Amino acid sequence: MMQGLPDWGVFGLFGVAALAILVLGTRITGLADRIADRSGLGEAVVGGIVLGAATSLSGTVVSVTAALQGAPELAFANGIGGIAAQTAFLALADLMYRKANLEHSAAEATNLFQGALLLTLLSLPLVAWLSPEVTVWAVHPVSVLLVALYCVGAVTTKRVRDEPMWVPVETEDTRKDTPEEEPSRKDAAVLFGTFALLVAALGVAGWVIAETGTALSERFGLSQTVVGALMTAVVTSLPELVTTIAAVRRGAMQLAVGGIIGGNTFDTLFLSLSDVAYRDGSLYHAVGAGSYFWLAVGMLMTAVLLIGLILRERKGPLTIGTESLALLVIYAGAVTLQVASG
């Protein structure tokens, strides 16, 4: 598709797709907040599962398309690099919330559970990489395990919300998840139908990003890891940035935090789908240490975020939480190392 286009045309398509993702992500946030109220599921559950999966669709398309084209590094780095970028976005949202540390205000048992689940899922690719290459129909067993654990985690997330065994201490800065609309099925078809159409459009934009990202990697001699972790991952993560900031502006703190953690959890499934799409063996053994560097960064940032959610610092340096500042420093350091190493 991209062979006949000049360089400026490829960059132009990349930019248009990025803008589309930005606009669509803004619209999806409002719908997700209404779905949380109308369905009675709550912001943390809808943010962690529905919104997380929806905003991750464009990234899913990028990784699967790259794997089908025989670009495993791009497929892997896009998914894992997105996790690091999206976690850094949460720190940026904390900067915009002036009342208190975002992680303090968004205290919710489901967010803690989702964070622990994310760390568990991120550890499995490392286990696969450090173990012998074993595949069934060119698919590694860890890919199946990732999907199974995600499904179990999604069901358990709902149970954690309905029957929490951990309840945060309420303070004047704690923001409760109070529905603005009563649970109702009225106009549900229109609400969910609009949401589905926007998600489909995100998928199309993701496909364009994948095609242009691959072309840019080939034309300018950039490594697939650099393109995946620092270009396509950041662009396809724009919905998470937009939805998180929009959620904070709406006062939907649990939706903001849950959307990031849930989106990151869903992003681990990029690896399963990419492993299925990659037909030359195990995806986990087809990528190098550079891609696993971003996996380690994602795990470190998730651990720092979990610490922040548990400690619930009210006020930190520079009006943001200490953990948010640490997240920005870790991500900036990782980007610097990646650029320096090429």
Image (tube, rainbow, N blue to C red):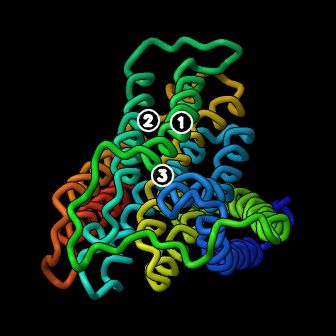
**Quadrant location, the N terminus:** bottom right
User: For mark 2, what is the residue?
Assistant: 121
On the question of residue 297 being in view, the answer is yes
On the question of residue 201 being in view, the answer is no
User: For mark 3, what is the residue?
Assistant: 264
Q: CA distance from mark 1 to mark 3?
A: 11 Å
Q: Residues within 10 Å of mark 2 (few under 14, many from 20)?
A: many
Q: Earlier in the sequence, mark 2 or mark 1?
A: 2
Residue type at the position of mark 2 = Leu
Residue type at the position of mark 3 = Asn
Nearer to us of marks 2 and 1 is 1
Q: Number of labelled discs?
A: 3
At horizontal 23% and vertical 68% (from top left) the residue drawn is 170
Q: Residues within 10 Å of mark 1 (few under 14, many from 20)?
A: many
User: For mark 1, what is the residue?
Assistant: 150
**Quadrant location, the C terminus:** bottom left
